[in-house]
Image (tube, helix red, strand yellow):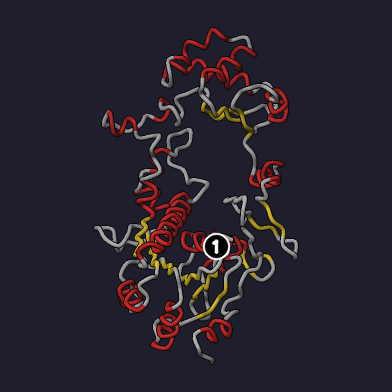
Amino acid sequence: MKLQGIRVVDLSVFLPGPYLTMIMADHGAEVIKVEQPGKGDPGREIGPVQGDTTVFFRNMNRGKKSIALDLKSADGRSKLLKLCETADVFVESFRPGVMERLGIDYETISAFNPRIVYCSISAFGQDGPYRNLPAHDLAVEALGGSLSITRDSNGHPVIPGIPAADIISGLQALGGVLMTLYRREKTGRGDRIDIAMLDGILAAYPNVLGPVFAEKREPILRHERSLGGSAFYQIYETKDGRHIVLGGQEMKFVHNLLSAVDRLDLLPLCERGPGPHQKPVIEFLRSLFLEKTQAEWIEWFRDRDICFAPVKTLREALDDPQARHRGMLLIDSNGREHLGVPIKFQHEPAQPRLTVPRLDEHRAEILSRIGETE
């Protein structure tokens, strides 16, 4: 596997850091999860429990090893520093300043292990006026502007279904860690990586910032190309109260659909691009799609060259033939479900270990590695 031989010391909790390190574990890295004695990662207590762990924790921490260390004690810090002597990657997600106060900051660790790749993930980064503010995904999405373009039909901001700031920052961190590991092969030195969830959200807008940059105004959602101003990039209700989407604005798709329903007279409105002039097209399609159920529309669109998709539930999405074919749902020996691995390699593919560590389960093994016993 691509990351076999890489050792990761993981102090992160909740979602962004554990997501990063689980991806590394899936591809062969040894991930040592350092947890708080008695409690562990708060994810152990979040959401429904299945077996001896929560689904939340399972989805973030499979394939890792766990040791509980009290980092406020000299003994706990000493053991952690010994682990870092042979580590390739160090990941933490505490508020800025905590690592310095504990004496396990980058400067301290890199002094005896200059090859360490030290990755910090926080809401707002290691500097700046918001440095010390507490925040999770929703607050970061609010400050980053994401909620301003995620609204319901009444114009009110809504909670996004995906924790975008968490997931994006985890993926940005993965890219940073892998780039540093690659560069280390030439320089012999690691680096400090400073990942801010807010930075990740701001970097995720390349397709919606046209009016903001060019016209110095906020997007008018019902007019913008990918935010509601196009009849062919839109969500429509069906007869049975479910929904379908049109997800492609290329004129070939527009022509194919309007031709099939004998409404090519609407084509010129679409050729003008997104905007309020497309309202008649949107209104026509709304009434059209209410004539059949979602299942009937799925059949109608079959073999037609139109960018279309039904809005599926989470269960339906996981059970979808494409998702199953791609291995995005895995079943362990206890019959429990796990998310699959999205990074596919032709050679040395991932081999996810579908085991979830109990708190402090690997203590004896990990301590023996640094020459210590209880």
Specify whether 267 is left or right of 126: right
Q: Position of residue 331 (x, y in %)?
A: 72, 58
Q: What is the quadrant of the C terminus in the image?
A: bottom right
Query: Quick one: label 1, few (<14), some, or many (20+) residues within 10 Å?
Result: many
Residue at 50% from the left image edge and 15% from the top image edge? 280
Specify whether 286 is left or right of 155: right
Q: Residue furthest top?
A: 265
Residue at 44% from the left image edge and 31% from the top image edge? 227
Residue 273 against residue 74 in the figure, above or below: above
Residue 208 sits in quarter: top left
Q: Position of residue 32 (x, y in %)?
A: 52, 73
Q: What is the quadrant of the N terminus in the image?
A: bottom right
Q: Position of residue 279 (x, y in %)?
A: 47, 18
Residue at 45% from the left image edge and 84% from the top image edge? 79
Residue 372 against residue 223 in the figure, above or below: below
Q: Secondary structure at mark 1?
A: helix
- Residue tagged 1: 22
The amino acid marked with disc number 1 is Met
Residue at 38% from the left image edge and 48% from the top image edge? 142
